[in-house]
Amino acid sequence: MIRFSTSSIQRGTVILVLLLAAGCGALRPTSAAHPSYYSLGSARIEPGTVPRTPALSAKAPTLIVNPPHAASGFDSQRIIYVRESHKLEYFAHSEWIDTPARMLAPLIVAAIERAGTFGAVVLTPSAAAGDLRLDTDIVRLQHEFGSHPSRVRFTLRTYVVDNTTRRVLASREFDESVGAASDTPAGGIVAANQAVQAVLERLARYCNEVAARWQHSGIEAAQLP
């Protein structure tokens, strides 16, 4: 008959417990790191940065703003950074709270409304009819690590269209680069908001100028014999 000593039984019990604990640990799902979510803030246009252009007729024009489109790679909630030319990479645990295009749309409307040139600035989809239409494309919004400090670059392509004739009245590409306070996603988000605000200020001035030229040409045409 085989006899086991008390110490042997105790050692075996300890080993069995450790094996069971290891097995349970392997079966337990690992907890993934929770991502941090960031947004593009409201357009805080400082007084005087966008000069008001007085309306040239009793009826100020209505501007219809189409939701921005985004170039391939920039149409998701993932935050993009660049270390090598033409190679887009994504932060693992940091994301936009929504796509840049959807966050940008109301900011464009707010910035142009503050300029005071248009009778109304309407974001589509809407049943409202408008005199002019603004189409925009996000070319890039990326954190670039090719220099020190790193920089965030935002490029927006824009078109102003006469809604009646469907003629493109003007087009322009706005590009802004802002240095980041730190080489981190959080530092890049601050720089991204500053770059977006700078572009929106320039966009509002641009829309003012195009609307003024459009109204002036209409008045001249109406005054012809």
Image (cartoon, rainbow, N blue to C red):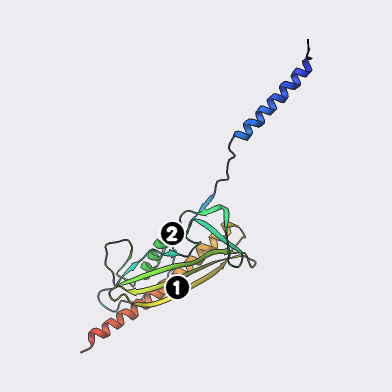
Toward the bottom, the furthest residue is: 225
| Residue situated furthest front in the rendering | 1
Q: Is residue 94 above or below residue 169?
A: above
Residue at position x 55%, y 60% from top?
Answer: 80
Q: Which mark is residue 202?
A: 1
Question: How many residues crowd around disc 1 within 10 Å: few (fewer than 14), some, or many (20 or more)?
Answer: some
**Mark 1, mark 2: which one is toward the viewer?**
2
Which three-letter amino acid code belongs to the residue tagged 2? Met
Residue 191 position (above or below residue 220): above
Q: Nearer the viewer, residue 137 or 48?
A: 137
Element marked by disc 1:
helix
Percent coordinates x, y for residue 36 in the rendering? 54, 50
Residue 196 at x, y = what percent? 48, 66
Q: Label 2 belongs to which residue?
A: 103
Label 2 Cα neighbours within 10 Å, binned few <14 / some 14-19 / many ≥20: some
Residue sitting at x 25%, y 74%: 59
Note whether residue 11 is visible. Answer: yes
Q: Residue furthest top?
A: 1
Q: Nearer the viewer, residue 109 or 140?
A: 140
- On-image quarter of the N terminus: top right
Q: Which amino acid, by three-letter code, is at mark 1?
A: Arg
Q: Secondary structure at mark 2?
A: helix
Q: Residue at x 63, y 67 (%)?
A: 146
The residue at 45%/55% (across/down) is: 98
Cβ atoms under marks 1 and 2 closer than 8 Å = no
Along the viewing direction, whichever of 4 and 121 lies nearer the viewer: 4
Q: In the image, 89: left or right of 55?
A: right
Residue 207 figure quarter = bottom left
